[in-house]
Every structure is written in C-alpha cells, then in structure tokens.
Amino acid sequence: MPVRFGDFTFDDDRRQLEKNAEDIHLSPKEFELLKLLIDNRPNALSKAMLHRDLWPDTFVSEVSLAALVARLRSALGEPARGGGIIRTIHGFGYAFVPDTGEAAAVSVAACWLTWNNQRIPIGEGTNVIGRSSDVQIPIESDLVSRRHAVLQVSQTEVTIEDLGSKNGTWVRGERVRGPVSLEDGDNILIGTECLTFHNLLMPGRTHSLPGFAPVTARRKSS
C-alpha cells in the first residue's frame, strides 16, 4: 500500500518514490533505507540494526551509513543535518517522522530512555533491551544479557519485565520479578547499567537508587 507524506508518495510494490507525481531517483540502498525507516515508523532504528539490514555479512564503517542518510536526505530535498522527514537521534540512529495528517499523535516520541548521555526513543508496542544488535534498545555491556528485558508501551501504561536475564532488572531499588509499571523519572538497572525512563504523557516523580554508582563493563576482547 502506498505511503504518502508531504508531497511524496512511496510505493514499495512498484519500487517507486514520487513527488507531485514525478519520479524521484533513488539508488537501491537509498530505497531500502527509506523502506526500513517507513516500515518501522514512528520507532527509531539503531545504527547497528540499519547496518545489519542494509549490509548483511559485510563490514562497512559508520561513515557509510551517515553518507547514505545524507544522500537520501538530499533526494528528499532536506538539509544534510535533517529536516522534517528523517530525524537523527544522536548517539543512537534514525527515525522516519510520519506526516502530521497520517499520525499526528506519534510524530514526536512521548517516551524515551536516557543512558550514557544518550536519548533513546521508545515506540509503542514491544521494545526489547539487551546486548544483541537486533533488539530495539541495544546496550553494549558484557553484564547485560542478549535479550535482557522488555518494555511494553501502550497509550495508557508503560511496563518493564525481565526476560530471565543472568544479572537481573531492577526498578526503584527492587528486583523485577514480573511486569512493573513505570513512572516518569524511574531509574532502571539493567545488569550494572543505569537507565532513566521519561514520559511526557504520564509525568510522575523522579526516583533514584541510593548509593548506586553506574559501572560500565569492559568489552570482552575477541
């Protein structure tokens, strides 16, 4: 089904992008990048996930992805640093911003995590946290399980549940043993990594873990 945003029409079945009924030329990689971002809207995709899907079994530098995004933005008539279609989430990845007529309620992420000076947006539905590169929220630490915990986001509640991790998940100083509802400002301990949950729609009070000092684990040498 074609997706319309602004003056553009994206048709995956016809492998075509049009602006005001005129064809816009995209390279195969540019088309695949735009398709990935549209298919996952409004969720942000990490750089690791984009690398995996765009260049499977091939090593490319991070500069390759940045250059590809810049070329796609140029084709869409956006400035190199982004505009109203492709949003940069600094330190994480990229997201497609839906047209306000299509999904005004989700054009800006209402929920996000902060970790290691990064802002990580959370999309509606299932968001897995873990060390694996194919999860929605990758955390690089040897003390974090590959699929460590899961956030479930609905319009009325956000919950977190541990996925049987080795080092556990903690919220408000207590170990998570089932689904736990999150409030704005909650600190979440994933292994030894401390994340803070933020929610614009359901603000609460800020919590802290007394005496906790985050520890960043060293990566195992290969």
Image (spheres, helix red, strand yellow):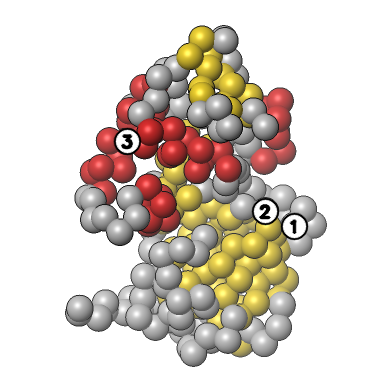
Numbered disc in front, either 1 or 3: 3
Q: Nearer the viewer, residue 30 or 192?
A: 30
In the displayed structure, would residue 107 be above or below residue 111?
Answer: above
Question: Tag 1's secondary structure?
Answer: loop
Proximity of marks 1 and 2: CB atoms separated by less than 8 Å: yes
Lower position in the chain sequence, tag 1 or tag 2? 2
Q: Which residue is mark 1?
A: 154
- Where residue 94 sits, quadrant-wise, is top left
Q: Amino acid at mark 1?
A: Ser
Q: Which residue is mark 2?
A: 124
How many tags in the picture? 3
Q: Nearer the viewer, residue 202 or 205?
A: 202
Relative horizontal placement of residue 199, taking residue 188 as reference (left or right) = right
In the displayed structure, would residue 14 be above or below residue 216?
Answer: above
Q: Amino acid at mark 3?
A: Leu
Compute the Cα span from label 1 to label 2. 6 Å
Q: Which residue is mark 3?
A: 68
Q: Residues within 10 Å of mark 1 (few under 14, many from 20)?
A: few
How far across and down, in percent of the image, does residue 197 sit? 58, 63
